[in-house]
């Protein structure tokens, strides 16, 4: 059964710092990996979707990498801003065309 | 604008009552999902449907029921058999197949009084 782990559970950084969030998964036979952002009391917003054939995806200040063989993904946030404060979750399909399995997220606070 | 609409946003229920949470999407997505979110536990899958008139149980389906009579609608009923229904409920959808991106609604918060 697919399991997803995110480290650290919480992170606090000063504004302007570059940071890396980590995601690991137990079954490397995945079709894709998706990163989400969640603000308090809100739904999830999709940030990046990486297909299994890709090694990374970029959107603005965000860069996500995927290493299927080691079961790991990282989300890199450049020049962090207070508006980046949120919980970041990663998710992978449990197998093939099946529902996503989520990590518990990393709660990020960017201090002005 | 295309998206996923969940209603109501907040719902209060007395013990022993059934409640139904609405989820409507106009993205023309085939697959729809219901997740439950509790503090410190992440998202857990309740039910999902990949095609009209068909649905499958997720990891925590006990005490819940769903229907998929229309492509755009996937309502979730929380029954009195659900022992601890107070939670944040999230509906999501995606296109069919392996590579689609998952999109979420804004969520519904259910509180049992």
Image: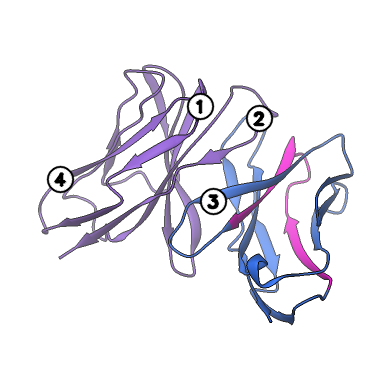
Residue indicated by mark 3: A44
Q: Could you tell me if the residues under marks 2 and 1 are in contact, i.e. CB atoms within 8 Å? A: yes
| Marks 2/1 same chain | yes
| Numbered mark located on residue B31 in the image | 1
Q: Nearer the viewer, mark 3 or mark 2?
A: 3
Which quarter of the figure has residue B23? top left
Q: Could you tell me if the residues under marks 3 and 1 are in contact, i.e. CB atoms within 8 Å? A: no
Residue indicated by mark 2: B100
Instruction: Check the rendered structure and report the hue given to chain B.
Output: purple
Q: Nearer the viewer, mark 3 or mark 1?
A: 3
| Marks 3/1 same chain | no
Q: Residue at x 35, y 30 (%)?
A: B74
| Marks 4/2 same chain | yes
Q: Residue at x 87, y 34 (%)?
A: A53
Residue indicated by mark 4: B18
Q: Residue at x 40, y 17 (%)?
A: B52
Q: Residue A26: within the magenta?
A: yes
Q: Bounds of the magenta span?
A: A18-37
Going from the N terminus, do you reach mark 1 or mark 4 first? 4
Which quarter of the figure has residue A96? top right
Report in which chain the residue with disc 1 lies: B
């Amino acid at each position: 059964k697919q399991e997803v782990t995110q480290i650290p559970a919480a992170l606090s950084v000063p504004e302007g710092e570059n940071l890396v969030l980590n995601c690991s998964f137990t079954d490397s036979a995945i079709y894709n990996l998706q990163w989400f952002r969640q603000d308090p009391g809100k739904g999830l917003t999709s940030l990046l979707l990486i297909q299994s054939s890709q090694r990374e995806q970029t959107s603005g200040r965000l860069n996500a990498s995927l290493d299927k063989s080691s079961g790991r993904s990282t989300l890199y946030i450049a020049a962090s801003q207070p508006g980046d404060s949120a919980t970041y979750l990663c998710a992978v399909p449990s197998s093939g065309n099946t529902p996503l399995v989520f990590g518990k997220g990393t709660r990020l606070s960017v201090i002005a | 604008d295309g998206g996923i609409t969940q209603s109501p946003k907040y719902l209060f229920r007395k013990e022993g009552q059934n409640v139904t949470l609405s989820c409507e999407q106009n993205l023309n997505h085939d697959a729809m999902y219901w997740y439950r979110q509790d503090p410190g536990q992440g998202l857990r899958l309740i039910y999902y449907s990949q095609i009209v008139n068909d649905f499958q149980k997720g990891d925590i389906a006990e005490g819940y029921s769903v229907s998929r009579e229309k492509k755009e609608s996937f309502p979730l009923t929380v029954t009195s058999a659900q022992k601890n229904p107070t939670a944040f409920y999230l509906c999501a959808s995606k296109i069919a197949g392996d590579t689609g991106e998952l999109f979420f609604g804004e969520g519904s918060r259910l509180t049992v009084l």
